[in-house]
Structures are given as structure tokens and as C-alpha cells.
Amino acid sequence: MKLIKPSKLLFGSAGIPLSTPDRNISNGVKHVRKLGLDAMELEFVRSVNVSEEKAPLIKEIAKKNKVVLTCHGQYYINLNSLEPEKVTASVGRVLNAARIAWLCGGYSMTFHAAYYMKLEAEKVFTKVKKEMKKIVKTLQDEDNKIWIRPETTGKPSQWGTFQEIVKLSEEVEHVLPCIDFSHVHARHAGPLGDASKYNNYDEFCEILGYVEKKLGREALNNMHCHVSGINYGPKGERNHLILKESDMKYKELMKAFKDFKLKGIIISESPNIEVDGLLMQKTYNNS
């Protein structure tokens, strides 16, 4: 199977659209197409809720409806745990989500990789890199070509600045970033008390320019991003908000996407997932 490489920027929902009749994954994929969106993220955040037997059907439905699938792995992952058995379990969770998402025809799988655990950032990077190499090697041995993407995180206690994620992508094969622009904003704006931090056109361009400088134009042609409104405090991210009820300057972000000629997937993680997905799509097309 050839890797899916989107020919343009596609917009989608984090999970089954809320307006889906008889809400299940298959109907959600069909409803995404009816809404005029192009992608849907399989939400495996609490459990991988698709069986090996059901996955091929989802793949068929997604292909028929021309909907690209991504996947968000479980929250219970910490590749830097001080307890070896928890690291082993975390690796297993990443692999399980990646395997099922691939059987569903998934293009990209993201997850929150680690916590600092009060250790030096460089030591944490080394540990995460070691475990990521194991994950990628296992999937390659299984001929699983899904993109593995650690996500930028919203709290300073979590490993995953955009610089760390990009560096990992430089050093580990078949790993690329999942840039959550809302997380980047919350991670910096909250502790600094600066609502403009990583929340304006110039700084959105700074992030995209950094990706291009370190990973090349090909990375900008193969993006997986999350966007939503976000509530934050001194410790960073608190919860997601509807775009229009937040300070997130999504119009400036869409302009940055347009000016950098991004290709890939933009997933709306707002509470009104499909509404903000369509809002971003419309804003992007009109920018």
C-alpha cells in the first residue's frame, strides 16, 4: 500500500462529528463527507475501540467517501516513566493504536509522548528517542507505513515543545511532528501571562519556518496539525474551547497556512468539532 500524501490542505474533525445520525465510526466517516470536510481523526484516547475484524470495513468506507483518517493514541503514555513496566506498556499502546489505525487505512498517528518527571530535558529526549526507534523498527518490520507523530504538548510539565518534536523527527526515521498550535500557545502564554505568545501571524510563521528549515519543504507538504480554542493558566493548558469563544487568532493561523502553502491534515479539536473544522476550512479558502 502506498503512503497517502495529501495533495492539498484537508480539514477534519477530532472524532465522529457531533451531528452524525446514529453515531458510530462508519457513519461518522460518511457524515464527514456530507458536511464537506475531508478528514476524521480516530479517537483512541481512552481505548482502541476498533477491532481487527472491523478495521477493513472502516478502511473501505473511508476510501469510498474520500475521507483521510488519522488517529490519536491513548492518553496513558509516558515513554519517560521512571517505572520500566510503564514504559513497556506505553510502547505497547502506541503500537496497538498504530496497528489498528493502519488497518483502517490511517495516514498518520499522533500521541502525547512523555513527561519530564523533573529530569533534564536532554536526558528525557534521549529516552524518548530510544523508545521511538523501537516503535518505528517494530512497525517497519510489520510493513506498517503509518506516520508516527509525537504531538506538541500544552503544559510545561509535558515533554514536547515544537523544537523537541522537530529534533526527534530529524533523528528518527519515519517520525514527523504533529503541531498542535493551541497547545503551543497555551504552553507559553499561560506561564508567561502573555495572551499574544505564539498567537499571531509572525509567530505562527516562525513555527512553520522552523519546521521547513530543519525538516525541509517535504515536511510542510505532509503536515498533521491540531487547532482549537484553548483555556490556559500558569501551568499551561486547561481545556479546549470553541474558537470564537477563545483568544486563538485562527484567522491569522489560516493565513500562515496559506502563505506557506501547507499540505496535509488540519484536525479541529474544539468542543464543536465539525463546526470549527468547517469554520477553519472556510476561513482558509477565503484568506
Image (cartoon, rainbow, N blue to C red):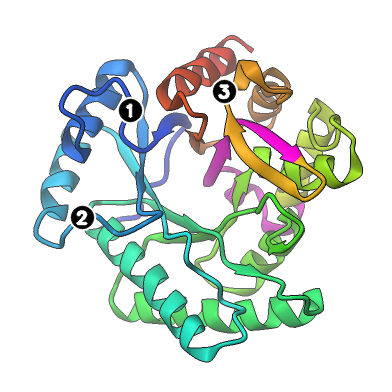
Q: Are marks 1 and 2 in contact (CB under 8 Å)?
A: no
Q: Amino acid at mark 2?
A: Val
For mark 1, give the secondary structure: loop
Residue 108 x %, y %:
42, 53
Q: Which of the marked residues, 1 or 3, is nearer the chain's N terminus?
A: 1
Q: Residues within 10 Å of mark 2 (few under 14, many from 20)?
A: some
Q: Which residue is under mark 1?
A: 17
- Residue 270 in the image: above or below residue 187: above
**In this view of the protein, can residue 65 be seen by the observer?**
no
Q: Which of the marked residues, 2 or 3, is nearer the chain's N terminus?
A: 2
Number of marks in the image? 3
Residue 122 x %, y %:
79, 78
Q: Amino acid at mark 1?
A: Pro
Where does the magenta region start and end?
A: 213-232
Q: Residues within 10 Å of mark 1 (few under 14, many from 20)?
A: many
Q: Which mark is residue 50?
A: 2
Q: Residue at x 78, y 76 (%)?
A: 118
Q: Residues within 10 Å of mark 3 (few under 14, many from 20)?
A: many
C-alpha span from label 1 to label 3: 15 Å
C-alpha span from label 1 to label 2: 17 Å
Q: Which of the marked residues, 1 or 2, is nearer the chain's N terminus?
A: 1
Q: Are marks 2 and 3 in contact (CB under 8 Å)?
A: no
Q: Nearer the viewer, residue 124 or 144?
A: 124
Q: Amino acid at mark 3?
A: Ile
C-alpha span from label 2 to label 3: 28 Å
For mark 3, give the secondary structure: loop
Location of residue 50 by image quarter: bottom left
Q: Which residue is under mark 3?
A: 242
